[in-house]
Image: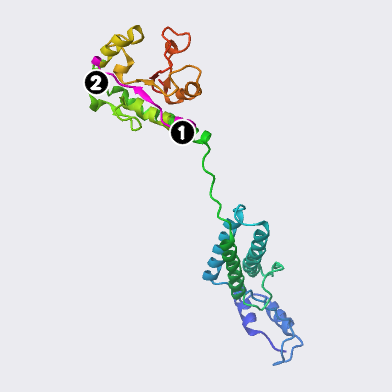
């Protein structure tokens, strides 16, 4: 009978000199009936089959191709449903191979083999090579599909959208334009120097206080979208002397010199159909101009004290 002397010695040493002789008995029982030198009949643990690894470069290429496939199939306006289905089928094969790699790693950690997807690499194959091949197939399919995709340009904004954009811009600019209300402080009505005013780019020779001018420019852009031409500015800022002349010509319809909003650079007179009540242009301005701070004041409307369809005044938004 062969004894496992290493185990016996270690147990005896740990137990001390007074320990019972159970060490020899256990050792003997463990090797009883086994001839010296005979091969052991104890079953050996079978080695788990290993899942072939995937190098980082191959994995990164596969993930990049999958991302590209996702972007292309999301754009349903440029490719057909049949093309999208083919891409998804090949992308699924790539994903399955990546999943095989991940499942294999989980199986190794748990000591068990995880079930693989039906399209995964077969045992004994080179998973990295399989993934590389599937990725190349996906890339080729993406290239072919992209080459045949229909290039569809986005539709231009509608007139209503363009007008809404100008209104939004006017609202957004209101706070920053508030500082311009002080540009004319310290000057008398009709005595504002040209340097303190801003000329209208669409109406050379006409000028207003800078905040009024900027918002009128936005209103003009919206007006041009609707009617195909700029606002016709007949008059804008008036010097004191110009107001005296206007008063002499128009009588009570013109403000007393020194009291006109023209003299503050915040009033305009319009032509081209706006000067008449009830026209399409007048009515459009009545509906839309207030969004830019401009309006035909109450006294100048039909039934007002001095009806003047052509006269429009500016009040800063939010004031």
Mark 2–mark 1 CB contact (< 8 Å): no
Position of residue 173 in the picture relative to residue 22 (left or right): left
Residue 12 horizontal/vertical position (percent): 63, 78
Expressed as whole percent of the image width and height from the top left, the position of residue 75 reads 59, 53
- Corner quadrant of residue 65: bottom right
Q: Report which residue position mark 2 lands on.
A: 192
Q: Is residue 152 left or right of residue 292?
A: right
Disc 1 target residue: 228
Q: Which residue is drawn at 25% across and 26% down?
A: 196
275 is within the stretch colored magenta: no
* Residue 93 quadrant: bottom right
User: Is label 2 in a helix, a strand or a loop?
Assistant: loop
* Residue 50, quarter of the rendered image: bottom right
Residue 302 higher or lower than 220, as above or below: above
User: Which residue is rendered at x = 72% and y = 92% of the image?
Assistant: 38
| Distance (Cα) linking label 2 and label 1 | 33 Å
Q: Which of 247 and 81 is in front in this view?
A: 247
Using the image, determine if residue 16 lies above or below residue 66: below
Between 114 and 96, the one nearer to me in the picture: 96
Q: Position of residue 158 (x, y in %)?
A: 53, 38
The boundaries of the magenta stretch are: 223-241
Residue nearer the viewer, 310 or 123: 310
Which of the two labelled residues, at mark 2 and mark 1, occupies the earlier sequence position?
Answer: 2
Tell me the quadrant of the picture where the N terminus can be found: bottom right
């Amino acid at each position: 009978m062969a004894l496992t002397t290493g185990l016996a010695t270690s147990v005896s040493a740990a137990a001390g000199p007074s320990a019972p002789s159970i060490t020899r008995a256990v050792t003997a029982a463990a090797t009883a009936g086994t001839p010296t030198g005979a091969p052991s009949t104890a079953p050996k643990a079978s080695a788990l089959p290993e899942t072939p690894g995937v190098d980082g470069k191959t994995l990164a290429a596969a993930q990049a191709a999958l991302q590209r496939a996702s972007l292309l199939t999301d754009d349903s306006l440029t490719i057909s449903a049949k093309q999208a289905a083919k891409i998804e089928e090949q992308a699924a094969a790539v994903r399955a191979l990546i999943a095989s790699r991940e499942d294999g790693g989980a199986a190794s950690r748990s000591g068990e083999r995880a079930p693989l997807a039906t399209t995964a690499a077969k045992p004994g194959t080179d998973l990295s090579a399989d993934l590389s091949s599937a990725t190349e197939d996906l890339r080729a399919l993406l290239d072919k599909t992209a080459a045949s995709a229909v290039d569809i340009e986005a539709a231009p904004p509608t007139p209503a959208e363009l007008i809404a954009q100008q209104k939004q811009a006017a609202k957004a600019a209101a706070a920053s334009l508030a500082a311009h209300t002080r540009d004319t402080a310290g000057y008398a009505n009709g005595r504002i120097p040209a340097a303190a005013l801003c000329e209208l780019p669409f109406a050379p020779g006409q000028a207003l206080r800078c905040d009024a001018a900027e918002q009128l420019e936005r209103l003009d852009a919206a007006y041009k979208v609707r009617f195909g031409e700029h606002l016709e500015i007949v008059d804008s800022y008036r010097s004191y002397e110009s107001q005296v002349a206007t008063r002499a010509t128009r009588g009570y319809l013109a403000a007393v010199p020194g009291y006109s909003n023209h003299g503050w650079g915040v009033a305009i007179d319009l032509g081209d159909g706006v000067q008449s009540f009830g026209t399409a242009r007048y009515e459009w301005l009545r509906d839309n101009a207030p969004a830019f701070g401009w309006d035909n004041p109450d006294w100048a409307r039909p039934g007002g004290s001095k009806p003047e369809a052509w006269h429009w005044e500016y009040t800063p938004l939010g004031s």
